[in-house]
Each structure stands twice: as structure tokens, then as C-alpha cells.
Image (cartoon, rainbow, N blue to C red):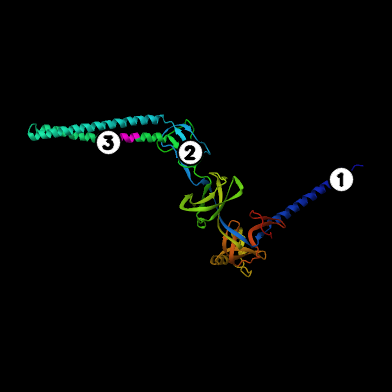
Amino acid sequence: MPMPSFLASKPIKFAMLALLVLALAGGVYFFWQGGKSTEGYRTARPARGEITAVVTSSGNITPVVTVNVGAAVSGTIKELFVDFNSPVKKNQVIAQIDPATFHAQVEQSQGNYLAAQANLEKAKVTLVDAQRTMKRYQDLVRDGSVSVSDFDTYATAAASAKAALGAAQGAVAQARGSYDQSKTNLDYATIRSPVDGIVISRAVDVGQTVAASFQTPTLFTIAQDLTKMQIYATVDESDIGKVREGGNATFTVDAYPEANFVGTVTQVRNAATTVSNVVTYTVVVGVDNTDLRLKPGMTANVTFVTAKKGDALKIPTAALRFRPKTPEIAGGGAGGEKTAGKGTEKGAAKAAGKRIYILKDGKPLPVTVTLGIGNDRETEVLGGELPEDAEIILEALAAKGKGSASPASSGPPSGPRL
């Protein structure tokens, strides 16, 4: 026999009411638990081992000697004899500008030079004749056969002939200079390699017109020796004092991400470069490229090794950046008793060294240490109040409720969570 509808609806109503009460109770519980939070810390212990101080930078790989070959005259490229990656020898012909115009200029200037030479010979003959006539009339003036005015006329002609000879000599020199220049321009139409090397860039094609009116256009770029390369790395002013000439450097390139290349610091330039109020200096690193794996223009990520120690007491560098949020947490003296926040800060300012925090009785305790060399991951501790078995605080962990915690700052854990 089926149950009446009013009896069947009552259990459903009670169940729904019970579920609603439970949901409200759970919400109130989680609300109050979420409002309460406790703070924990990520810690690490000091360790002994090798530590290396480094300075990182980046730069471009370039050949030690790079020559830009240009054209000293304007014209049309008639022929190219080399291309990218072509090996060349010194004085080898690598391109030819159409020489027809320059040949015509040579012939024209040569004709002008020959004409100037002929005029010079004519001026010499004229001068000799004028001087001979002047001398004859000079003897006649003494005898009284001719007047002095007639003699002056011939003397003037002799002086004029002498001046004309000087002008003819100047014209010859000018014509000779023009002739030499036209021959030089003809020679410039043939482009030759100035060094032994390899062509790494070609900027022209056959039929292209090059104009050398204002500046010499670059036709080829030739690297003299690709087995010796160098890196121009930029180093920040805060780190440049650690880099020394003759020091070691390692670097990587994107083309070979698994390979570490080795170089030597050959020069630390004194000229500073300022961009957006950031001062940097250029450091030149010499690289052996016998296997020709490195190519010009590659970006190198350089690491300069500035110092290295073997058995050093080291701590994570992240510990130097940790500071408690409240003065009450920061309190605590050497014996564990709490002190005022201001007094603690004054004591730290007077103390020599760097302040870090260790975990003692579940609370941060400030200690002062003397630091040595370091890098982005580890820093050497030379002395101070740090016990070797101390738990050094790296960062704070904000825990929500009971049994769950979330780090205040991201990063892989390097110590136990409390």
C-alpha cells in the first residue's frame, strides 16, 4: 500500500533542513578558522664547501680584426669575384667598378698634360728669344744706335716671356696632378682585399651603383682571423671593480646551450657608457675559436670568476633579504630575551657586519655576521654570532587555519617548514 503524500514529504523536509544547518555550521567554522593565521618560516642550515664569487654580463662575439672594404670612387658594379664566406688573400681583386668612364678621364687628362708640356717648351723658346733680343738692343743703346725707349720695350718683352714660362710650368704641374688623379681613380675602380681573411658580409650586387660623394660606401666586411674572437661585455659600475685583466671568464651561447666556453679578460676599458642614468663599462674577453664553432654576432652570456674558496662556511643569499614584518617578532637578544624594536635596530646599525635571522624557540632571533665572497645563490660567512647548526630563516610562510600553509614568497624549499 503506497504511503500518503503528506507522510512522504516530511522526511525530505527534515533532510533538507539538516543539510542546511550543517552547511551554515561549516561556513561559520571555516570563516572563524580562516580569520586566524599563524606564521611559519622556511629555513636552511649553514654548510661548508666551495664557493665562487662571480659577475655576470652579456655581450656580442666579434672577430679581433674586422675590415670594412669600401669604394673610393662612384660607379656601377660591373663584376663581383667573391661572396659570403669566401676566403681572400691580401691584394686579391674582389670587385670591379665599370672602368670605362675612368679610362676616358685618364686619356683626357693625359692629353691636357701633353699640351701643357708643349706650352712649357714654347714658353722656354720665347723667353730665350726675348732675352737674346734684349741683350742685342742693350749693346746698341751703349753705342747710341737706338733709343733707350726701344730698349725698354724689348726688356719688358723679355720679362713677360719669363713670367709666361713660370705660368707654363704651373700649368704642367696642374695637368700632371690631374693626370695622376685620373690614373688613381682608375686603380680605385678595381676593389682589392686589404688583408688575408674571410668575407663575412657583402652589401652590393652586380649592376648596383655606388656613390662615394659624401662618404665611402661599405661593400664588403672581411674578418682577418676567425680563429681568434673577442666578446665586448658590458659590466655595471658596481661590479667593475671586481673584474681584472688576465682573469678567467666562462660564457654560453644560445647555439650551444650545453657547452661552456672559456675566455680571458684582455682589457677593462676606462670609458664609461651612461644609458638612462645606468653607468656601464666595456670588458673585452679574448676567446680561442680554433674549431670555428663561434660565429660573429652571437650573443654570449658571460660569467667572470672574481674569487674562489674551498672550505668556506656558506649560507643562502636569500637569508640576507629576510626581515620580520613586526618589531615584536624582530626582538630577542643573544640570551633569548626580547628587546624593543627600536633598540634592536640601533644595535644593528652600530654592529659591524650584516644582520640575518635564525629560528630559536619558534621565533626569529637577529644575529650579526661578517660576510665574505658570494654570488646570487650563496654567501660566505667569515665570522660573527652564527652557530653552524643554526636554522637560518629564508622567508616567512603564512599558514591559514590548522595544518595548511602557503609561502609568503615563491621559491623552492631549502629547509624544513615549521
Q: Relative to residue 189, is residue 411 drawn left or right?
A: right
For the residues labelled 3 and 2, the Cα–Cα distance comes to 41 Å
Question: In the rendered structure, which segment of residues is drawn in magenta?
Answer: 168-179
Instruction: Give the position of the N terminus as an image quadrant.
Output: top right
Q: Of the residues under marks 2 and 1, which one precedes in the sequence?
A: 1
The vertical placement of 83 against 274, above or below, is above
Residue 328 found in image quarter: bottom right
Instruction: Give the position of the C terminus as an image quadrant.
Output: bottom right
The amino acid type, in three-letter code, at marker 1 is Leu
The amino acid type, in three-letter code, at marker 3 is Gly
Q: Name which residue lies at 79% across and 49% down.
A: 17
Q: Which labelled disc corresponds to residue 170?
A: 3
**Which residue was labeled with disc 1?**
7
The amino acid type, in three-letter code, at marker 2 is Phe
The vertical placement of 377 against 149, above or below, is below
Q: Of the residues under marks 3 and 2, which one precedes in the sequence?
A: 3
Q: Name which residue lies at 64% across and 58% down.
A: 396
Q: Nearer the viewer, residue 63 or 39?
A: 63
Q: Are marks 1 and 3 in contact (CB under 8 Å)?
A: no
For the residues labelled 1 and 3, the Cα–Cα distance comes to 136 Å
